[in-house]
Image (spheres, rainbow, N blue to C red):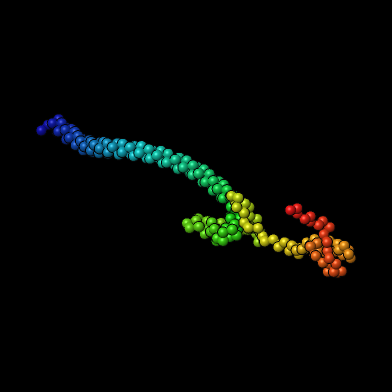
């Protein structure tokens, strides 16, 4: 074998060694590329899922924002309703108190008429009615010492008046004196129809004697 052949064989061996090393490196790079591509594709699929999830989160966020806006609107509406209800409650209770101020003396008057005129019991108070929502302390009581109003005429019917003092007895009956005439003898007053004067025993004669009837 000549030296030239040896050099050629040596160069081939060196080339084979280099090719082998580079082929190994190439295979490593190829595997790395394939792994990176596979990983990249996997990350791409994950990225698509993440973006989809982000879109869902954004939609949920907007829905929550709308819910919060609706909740705030409901709170404002409820505050308005509460305020209106409080005003209505105050107005109705004030009307009830004002009506009760008129109801109380009228009921006292009706109770007085029932007792004095018909001998009936009083009507039940508002808190004594069956199923009444009114409690005894709902309305303020009458001040101590307050007198009930005087009864008025109801439908032309008046309670009996208070008994009056009996009128004084009539004067004693004074009998009229009998008709009298003067006695012609003693001139004393005697009964007009007396035939004889009881004083002088003179026979009494009438000043206007009856004329005898003509036959």
* Outermost residue toward the right in this view: 186
* Outermost residue toward the top in this view: 4
Q: Quadrant of the N terminus?
A: top left
In percent of width and height, residue 44 lies at 29, 36
Q: Nearer the viewer, residue 201 or 14?
A: 201
Q: Is residue 182 visible?
A: yes
Q: Residue at x 23, y 38 (%)?
A: 31
Q: Could you tell whether 75 is left or right of 191 in the image? A: left
Whether residue 96 is situated above or below residue 3 in the rendered picture:
below
Q: Residue at x 27, y 38 (%)?
A: 42
Q: Nearer the viewer, residue 151 or 127?
A: 151
Q: Residue 19 lies in what quarter of the image?
A: top left
Q: Could you tell whether 1 is left or right of 165 in the image? A: left
Q: Is residue 54 visible?
A: no
In percent of width and height, residue 201 lies at 85, 69
Q: Could you tell whether 204 is left or right of 83 in the image? A: right
Q: Nearer the viewer, residue 48 or 33?
A: 48
Q: Residue 65 lies in what quarter of the image?
A: top left
In percent of width and height, residue 11 lies at 18, 32
Q: Residue at x 24, y 36 (%)?
A: 34
Q: Could you tell whether 190 is left or right of 141 in the image? A: right
Q: Nearer the viewer, residue 60 or 79?
A: 79
Q: Residue 190 lies in what quarter of the image?
A: bottom right
């Amino acid at each position: 074998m000549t030296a030239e052949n040896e050099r050629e064989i040596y160069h081939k061996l060196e080339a084979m060694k280099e090719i082998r090393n580079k082929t190994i490196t190439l295979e490593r790079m190829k595997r790395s590329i394939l792994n990176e591509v596979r990983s990249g594709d996997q990350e791409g699929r994950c990225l698509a899922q993440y973006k989809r999830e982000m879109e869902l989160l954004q939609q949920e966020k907007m829905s929550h924002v709308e819910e919060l806006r609706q909740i705030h609107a409901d709170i404002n509406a409820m505050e308005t309703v509460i305020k209106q209800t409080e005003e209505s409650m105050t107005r109705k209770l004030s009307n009830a108190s004002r009506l009760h101020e008129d109801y109380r003396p009228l009921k006292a008057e009706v109770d007085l008429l029932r007792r004095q005129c018909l001998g009936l019991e009083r009507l039940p108070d508002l808190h004594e009615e069956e199923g009444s929502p009114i409690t005894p302390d709902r309305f303020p009581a009458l001040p101590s010492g307050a007198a009930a109003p005087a009864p008025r005429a109801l439908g032309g019917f008046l309670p009996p008046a208070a008994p009056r003092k009996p009128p004084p007895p009539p004067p004693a009956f004074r009998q009229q004196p009998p008709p009298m005439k003067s006695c012609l003898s003693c001139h004393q007053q005697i009964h007009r129809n007396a035939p004889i004067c009881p004083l002088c025993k003179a026979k009494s004669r009438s000043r206007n004697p009856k004329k005898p009837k003509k036959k």
